[in-house]
Amino acid sequence: MPRIRLHLPGGSGPDRSYDILVRPGVIGEIGPTLAGYGVRRTVVLVDAAVEATHGSAVLESLRGKNIDAFTIAVPSGEGSKTVDEAARIWESMAHRAVDRQTHVVAVGGGVVGDLAGFVAASFARGLPVWQVPTTLMAQVDSSIGGKTGVNLAAGKNLVGAFWQPLGVFTDIDTLVTLPDREFRSGLAEVVKYGMILDGELFSWLEGHAESILARNAGALTRVVERSAAIKAGVVEKDEREQNGLRAALNYGHTFAHAFETASGYGAMLHGEAVSIGMHCAARLAESLGRIGPDVVDRQRRLLEALRLPLAAPKSGSSPDSLIAIMLRDKKSVAGTLRFVLPSRIGRVDLVDGIDAAAVRHVLG
Ligand code: NAD
Ligand code: GLY
């Protein structure tokens, strides 16, 4: 299944459906594809760590079709997902006379994808954007679905916009250079898909942890394709997180965002925080009688098999300070705690009004 179509019919507006092309070497198709859209000019926002490799492959493909392309490199890491970095890019684009005919191409992981998407959504009131994810996290999750944004000191992703790409080029070959810790971080979101929607995927992951960690090409292709298809399926049913379906993708994330905010952005990788967050969420669900210990154990064993963490390093953040951060999370409503909690493997519910004492208990 090399092409996944995310359907977003426009209603009274234009159709915003797009393709997620998953195949080795697909980076080379960027130039021809954009030329097919009549694109003449692009700005390539690229993670500095991959500028010389995947960034230059993107430039070569664009220029091969006589598409004008200039690059703005973004320093690697979560510390770049800021209003300041967005402003630096806006200024630089203004100096290069970027106009509404210029397309943005985001090359990198979730940090560059989220930042570039936000810059595209906001510059000149909106430029078309294409995503070229080069981390597992970005290929299975962040490049799909149009959530873009930056962090504030007060909380993760608090400023942003829904801004769908025109297409996603997912080249599994780019993962060859990805460090192991970053690779494992992306696997947390794959476990998440199994927990929230696909018990069969969860069981398959349990049986293939070693070949996944060894980055066996077949296993990796299956992981990326299945995850991208699940994410696309959710987004097309609930683009703006309005009917509860997309909210399921936030399983483990209320805890995760609090850990990331409290520990200082970048200290903990996003997927590591999600892994710890899912373990907390499962224990919370167990303490509320929603699941038995067997579900907590199966999830714990799979996370351990994929060498993902289950507990945050002792940082000195008290449970109460973490809860205060959770109350500022976009997912909380009217000052009450709201969590996505499992009812079995492959199914979760959005649960409102959870008592802070129960949350304090799993954080303690
Ligand atoms: P990242 O973008 O920081 O990339 C991880 C590291 O890998 C960086 O150091 C980067 O320089 C490096 N890198 C990237 N591609 C590489 C490659 N091919 N080879 C070698 N090194 C490479 O982190 P990430 O895990 O990709 O993304 C995390 C971010 O994504 C977080 O900010 C998170 O909030 C966001 N996110 C967003 C969504 C969404 O729906 N928008 C979903 C999930 C996560
Ligand atoms: N990663 C959460 C979402 O896209 O909704």
Image (cartoon, rainbow, N blue to C red):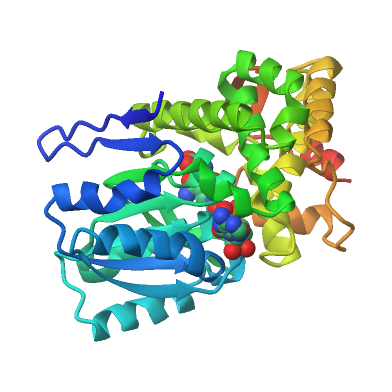
Which of 268/154 is in front? Answer: 268
- 125 relative to 236, above or below: below
Which residue is found at the position 66% from the left and 65% from the top? 265
In-image side of 73 versus 13 (left or right): right
- 11 relative to 164, above or below: above
Which residue is found at the position 67% from the left and 61% from the top? 261
In-image side of 294 versus 262 (left or right): right
Which of 110/277 is in front? Answer: 110
Image location (x, y in percent) of residue 199: 63, 15
In-image side of 273 versus 238 (left or right): right
Which residue is found at the position 54% from the left and 30% from the top? 221
Q: Is residue 293 visible?
A: yes
Q: Is residue 330 visible?
A: no
- 240 relative to 4, above or below: below
Image location (x, y in percent) of residue 303: 78, 33
Image location (x, y in percent) of residue 14: 12, 40
Which of 88/354 is in front? Answer: 88
Image location (x, y in percent) of residue 87: 39, 79
**Residue sitting farthest toward the front:** 64
Instruction: Report the number of numbered marks.
Output: 0
Q: Based on the displayed image, in which of its 4 quarters is residue 38 positioned?
A: bottom left
Q: Based on the displayed image, in which of its 4 quarters is residue 201 positioned?
A: top right
- Report the quarter where the N terminus lies: top left
**Residue sitting farthest toward the bottom:** 95
Figure quadrant, ligand 1: bottom right
